[in-house]
Structure formats: structure tokens, C-alpha cells
Image (cartoon, helix red, strand yellow):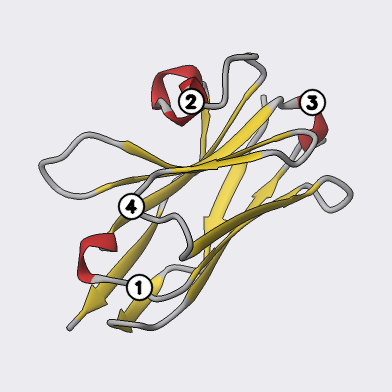
Amino acid sequence: LVQLVDSGGGSVQVGGSLRLSCAASDIIYRYYYMGWFRQAPGTEREGVAVIDRDGSTNYADSVKGRFTISRDNAKNTLVLQMNSLKPEDTAMYYCAATVNIVSMIQALAHRWYPYWGQGTQVTVSS
């Protein structure tokens, strides 16, 4: 079983940036999709950004143009660069991995992912 360790969260002001990292204990090329998900209190976990093993990406509409997902298969690391942060981006962020091969649209749904990091908190204040 792969172990995923999230890091990089913190508190920033509106318009600021954060870079989240996810270190994997396994060869991440084995996992067809890796992604970032977030969950605010009282809400469902939602897909933020996903990337397949070849580097194709998909983003939630709310973060397009502001967030960038990338994966380094050689270093077994997943990264989420978040720019122009807004208060509504405040949530616990989780990285996840799956071997399931689904469409790019389906890949934003958390139910396809059996492997999860512990989460890292992002707080954006105005």
C-alpha cells in the first residue's frame, strides 16, 4: 500500500500563493491518476485538480487559471501550485492516488480514489 504525506499548507491573505506537496512511498507511475481534493467543514470532499500518468490534467472550474497540478514520477511527488488564493479556497487539502482508469471528468470524483494523504490545512483570510 502506498503512503501519501501531504505538506505545504498554511495561512495566507487573499491573493497570496501556496505550494502543496505530496510525497509517495511507492512508484507513482503505477497510479493512473493522482489528484488534490479539498473539504471545508460541513461540505462534501470535492476534486480540485487531477493528473494522469502521462501528464494530462483536469481542474475544477473554480480553480482554473489559478492552480496548477504537476507530478514528478522520478521523485514520486505530486505538487499543487495555488495562486491568487480566495477565502473560498479555505479547506483541508488531500492528495490521493488511484489505479482506476476512468475519464478525466470522472477522475475529479473522490470515490475513485482508495489511497489518501492525511491532509494539510489551507486558510485564506481577507
Residue indicated by mark 1 = 85
Q: Position of residue 18 (x, y in %)?
A: 48, 74
* For marks 1 and 3 on the same chain, the one whose residue lies earlier in the sequence: 3
Residue indicated by mark 3 = 30
Which amino acid type is shown beneath numbered disc 3? Answer: Arg
The label number, if any, that marks residue 62 in the structure image: 4
- Secondary structure beneath dot 2 equals loop
Q: Position of residue 10 (x, y in %)?
A: 38, 74
Q: Is residue 112 above or below residue 70?
A: above
Question: 90 or 10, which is in the foreground?
Answer: 90
Residues under numbered marks 1 and 3 in contact, where contact means CB atoms less than 8 Å apart = no
The label number, if any, that marks residue 18 in the structure image: none
Which amino acid type is shown beneath numbered disc 1? Answer: Leu
- Secondary structure beneath dot 4 equals loop
- Secondary structure beneath dot 3 equals helix
The CA distance from mark 4 to mark 3 is 29 Å
* For marks 4 and 2 on the same chain, the one whose residue lies earlier in the sequence: 4
- Mark 4 or 3: in front is 4
Disc 4: CA contacts within 10 A as few (<14), some (14-19) or many (>=20): few
* For marks 4 and 1 on the same chain, the one whose residue lies earlier in the sequence: 4
Residues under numbered marks 2 and 3 in contact, where contact means CB atoms less than 8 Å apart = no
Disc 2: CA contacts within 10 A as few (<14), some (14-19) or many (>=20): few
- Mark 2 or 3: in front is 2
Q: Image point 29% across, 36% down: which residue? A: 45
The CA distance from mark 2 to mark 3 is 20 Å
Quadrant where the C terminus sits is bottom left
Which amino acid type is shown beneath numbered disc 2? Answer: Ile
Residues under numbered marks 1 and 2 in contact, where contact means CB atoms less than 8 Å apart = no
**Quadrant in which residue 103 is drawn:** top right
Residue indicated by mark 2 = 105
The CA distance from mark 1 to mark 3 is 32 Å
The CA distance from mark 1 to mark 2 is 24 Å
